[in-house]
Amino acid sequence: MKWDEILDAKNRYDEKGFLDEYLEWGDRLIESYKSTKSHQDNIEKAMIMGMGGSGIVGDIIKKYIESTNNIWIDVIKTDKLPHDTSKYDIIIFISFSGNTKETIEAFRKTLKNNGNREKVYGITTGGILEKEANKFNTNIIKVKPALAPRSGLPQLLGATLKLFEPTTKDNLQNTIIKIGKLLKGDARENYIENKENRAYKIAYHIWGRYPIFYGTDITEPILKRVKAMINENAKLSGYYQIFPEGYHNEVEIFDYQIDPVLLPLIIRWEREEDEFIYLKNYLEEKDIEYYEIVIEANEYLEYLLRGILILDMATIYLAYLTRRKPLETNVINWIKERRRLE
């Protein structure tokens, strides 16, 4: 596809500027972090509950916070909560819209059963979650809106991270400011003004193929996110696998007759040991195509966010290539409307 056709596809299928929102990710992360008040009590055990684009916040924070701090974080993606929530020092419910069915139901149950409401937080743009928090006089953190919940990730992440600031070993504010500046640069570098940028090239490799995303345990939040964005933005299927577990099952799909539509995409941090050397050697020996995405970053949270941003943008370019509107989620909305709470 010629680049003029990509520009035309953006104008035709992304008239509200969904891709443009990524240019603001860095600023939104910093602003959200700075404008949120931290949780002053010591945190040793936390629970973060959310679904979809809100739930990925818990995945990111769990991996990052637990990697450098003696803090245990449970991430819940269902309204069926642990039997005893009193064991947590902080309980965080995240719903960008404020109307997510599972999150509202879990929030209501917690406020009904937990006497200490000072440690319960809701993070949202408004909706039922805000109303319930005000009704029960518990903590509510409002973040700025976005075109879609999934593009509101930096606001949700910045606010949630701030709650952990007093009990982490890291200088979180300096880290957030530095990463925010890097995200601004990455978004501009991969914006549509730059012909055939890196995000577009990733999309081009996936175009017409079935993507299977591979990474190690530290990459799992990126893998979860890109799988979801392939679904929501490009309206395509895909899956992910964690290695080295994949060496005990996944790799067998490359024996005998290889489905030519499959495209393995290896995502890894430049600083981690290359767990995929054996897989790559095998694929090259068998002349099986794969695509490797190495993310440069000086620290772990930077790796997660820079990886998510470039792959998010790639899925939007993939939508342009397949003539689909990345912002629209018609099936999700159809189902949400029928599951809507009052």
Image: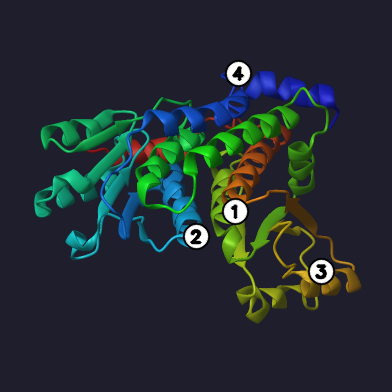
Sequence-earlier tag: 1 or 2: 2
Residue 273 x/y as whole percent: 72, 67
Q: CA distance from mark 2 to mark 4?
A: 42 Å
Residue 78 x/y as whole percent: 31, 56
Q: Quadrant of residue 16?
A: top right
Sequence-earlier tag: 3 or 4: 4
The residue to which callout 3 is attached is 280
Q: Nearer the viewer, residue 52 or 163?
A: 163
Q: Amino acid at mark 2?
A: Thr
User: Counting other residues with Cα less than 10 Å from the Cα at mark 4, is it few (<14), some (14-19), or many (20 or more)?
Assistant: few
Tag nearer the camera, 1 or 2? 2
**Does 163 sit above or below residue 279?**
above
Q: Which mark is residue 68?
A: 2
Viewed as shown, does residue 170 lie left or right of 217?
A: left
Q: Secondary structure at mark 3?
A: helix
Sequence-earlier tag: 2 or 3: 2
Q: Secondary structure at mark 2?
A: helix
Residue 52 x/y as whole percent: 43, 46
State if disc 2 and disc 1 touch (CB < 8 Å).
Answer: yes
Q: Amino acid at mark 1?
A: Tyr
Q: Which mark is residue 300?
A: 1
Tag nearer the camera, 2 or 4? 2
The residue to which callout 4 is attached is 15
Q: CA distance from mark 1 to mark 3?
A: 24 Å
Residue 190 x/y as whole percent: 73, 32
Q: Secondary structure at mark 4?
A: loop
Q: CA distance from mark 3 to mark 4?
A: 40 Å
Q: Which mark is residue 69?
A: none
**Does 56 sit above or below residue 22?**
below
Sequence-earlier tag: 2 or 4: 4
Q: Amino acid at mark 3?
A: Lys
Q: CA distance from mark 4 to mark 1?
A: 35 Å
